Image: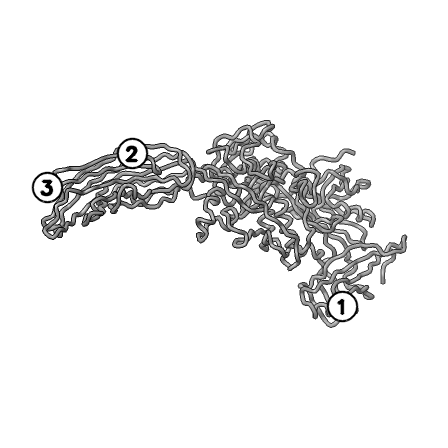
Amino acid sequence: MLEQNAPRFRYTFDGEFGRRVLRADPKGWEETGVNLHRDPKYHGQTLEYITQLAFVQDGRVYLSQAYAQRGVEADVRLLIEQYDPNAFVWKFYSEGQVHMLSRVETATEFRCNIVQKDFTQKFNNRTDTAVDAFGNDSIGGVALPAKQPLVLELHSQAIFKRYQADYAPDPPMIASGFVMDDPSREQLLYFGFGQPQVDDFEVEEVYGGPVVGERPQAVPIYRTKEEGDFTIDFEFFTQLRVKLTASSGSGDFDTVEGEYYFRINDEPAVLLASFGDTSIAGDFFATVDVPRRRITRRLRVGDRIYLFGRIYVHDINPNALGQYRFEIQLQHNGGHFRMEALTQTPATSCQGLLAYEAMERVCQAATDERVAFRSAYFGRTDTQPAYPGDGAGSGLFISGGFQVRGFPLSEKPMTLTWEGLFDSLAATHWLGTGVEQRPEGPVVVVEPVPYFYPDTLTLDLSSAPVEVTSTTEADEFYNKVELGYRKWETQQVNGLQEPNSRREWALPLTAAKNTYTFLSPYSAAGFYLEATRRQRYDATATTDQGSDADSFLICVLRSPSGWQTERDQRFSRVEGVLSPDTLYNLRLTPARLLRRHGPALRACLLHQDRERIRFSFGEGNNELLTQLMGEAAPVAESADVVVESLPAPLWRPEQDEFTAPVSREQLAQLLAAPRGRIRYRDQTGLIKEGWILDFKHTAREGEGTFTLRPALTLLAV
């Protein structure tokens, strides 16, 4: 029997099997209520209703038939309405999805969970599913509006490269050739330096020895792939022999002459050394050394570097049969060949998406809905829908390793997952996300964390004191911070120059041992991006690169023609790094990320304002110092940070829990604005405010259990 004044509910099934108002109430209806939960990592809120109901009679029959026809994919929605005895009408209370995976069926009942609506369920279950950013269908096969790639011109970030081959053979290297006919009287000499110790230019090993040919036929030891000021440094020590052989018979030669040269392109060759003799009786022998030379030249892509010699054997006296055979031996006794340059290459095109469109496409594909995403922070005046202005995060371009290398999308699609994309943006911008009901329907919302903790009052419960249990959140006190990027190394010398790597700081707390960690899965490392960009599709289409499966964040600026890469255009100072005017992503350095995450860190340092967050460890370049135009002070990557210089915290790292009466009207007010503050009075009479972490309302009892995150400051009354 129903208690007097107990709430009355009506249950209705709807979906692909038709609409059915149930005659028999399910078992467990007495616990009908609302649960509101805030994700501790993503800050968004999830609205949930009854966890489990047992349907009987007509409800059991309906669900049993639905399961028999469609199994766990059966689409059945449950609408719950509450009767208003004052207005004599049924009013909406909640709705959810029947979760067939939780089915327990007997002869008399069909027990199952009621979960979030289909949109949220689909999205949560597909956050790690790869999505083709330019595909025409969602994960569930729903046709999506075409998404055109944005073609961005990637400038060349200067990369310092080295080649070093220091050669000290033991025993010396000897290479041979033979003079047997008129063409072989003149031969080219190449000087081998062995396996290089450093080979950023990918010259590989330079081999040596005599080869039949004349000076114009010389082969370059390297054809440049980059532009830059090259410094070329070499020296080497050789011995030359021209020997009579047994097969020479009585043939011999009288004259040997030759030279060693250095040359660039078709310019006049630089004579390095010469040798010769015009009255030879027997074998010819000469020691030819080239003292150290250091040459600096501006070279462009495709320029040719030559280092070679020429030897000419003439005044030959053949044997009686008109034959001769002499052996040329080039013995390399040591030396070195080194080359270095700060290099650049021509700009290249890259296909990708701006951050808003990238997140929108993943949300559309995951939810099977065309309208699925909103963000004022990443939105722009030219997005769909348009926003009043370009958001602070709108100038961010997303692309993949294959696209950076120039692969056609038809061969290598650009794939994204929500986890990888959002976790990268959250690490670099301190973001939250959640599903919200908007006039256009449910959408995934991404905004800076403060959006999810607004300075608005949703519910005032302060008219009467409540018994508050306050708990310190030990997990939100940190003694170490780790920020930056998981992937940044280039496997080249420039890795030491890369600022967008990983950093650690020590917080001035001794009572806690927790690490605040946000490492972006996507890379913002300019040197890594540039090394990937130079491995072009047309040159290495069959060569896999370690970066092919990686994704990149690239800061961009609006230009009259569209979008351009951001370098140092917005900065008044950039120091401590190679070629600052060509760097990518100066806005995304770890020290700047520390400041973006500052409110979360200051929350656990409320009594430590004068203390310092001390830099303790960093990979790559820790010497970078940058200052944006209009910025009061520069940001140094390896500097300590005074706590009070960080942005102010929003909350206290605590939880306040209490139970209070919540009427139907107050519940509606709360559900209409669940992100806002709740005002309450504790048992001592102190007025406090906080944001909902967890809220459970039971309609039968007409009260709610609140777990709140206390606000640091109160709103003005």
From the image, tell me which residue sits under label 1. Answer: 62
| Residue found 75% across the figure and 42% down from its top | 678
Q: Is residue 521 visible?
A: no
- The disc placed on residue 270 is 2
From the image, tell me which residue sits under label 3. Answer: 281
| Residue found 76% across the figure and 56% down from its top | 95
Where's the N terminus, which quadrant? bottom right
3D distance between C-alphas at marks 1 and 2: 93 Å
3D distance between C-alphas at marks 3 and 2: 31 Å
Give left or right: position of 283 versus 531: left
Q: In this rendered view, identify the residue nearer to me: 537 or 551.
A: 537
Helix, strand or loop at disc 2? strand
Q: In this rendered view, identify the residue nearer to me: 372 or 284.
A: 284
Name which of mark 3 and mark 1 comes first in the sequence: 1
Which amino acid type is shown beneath numbered disc 1? Tyr
- State which mark lies toward you, 3 or 1: 3
Quarter residue 464 falls in: top right
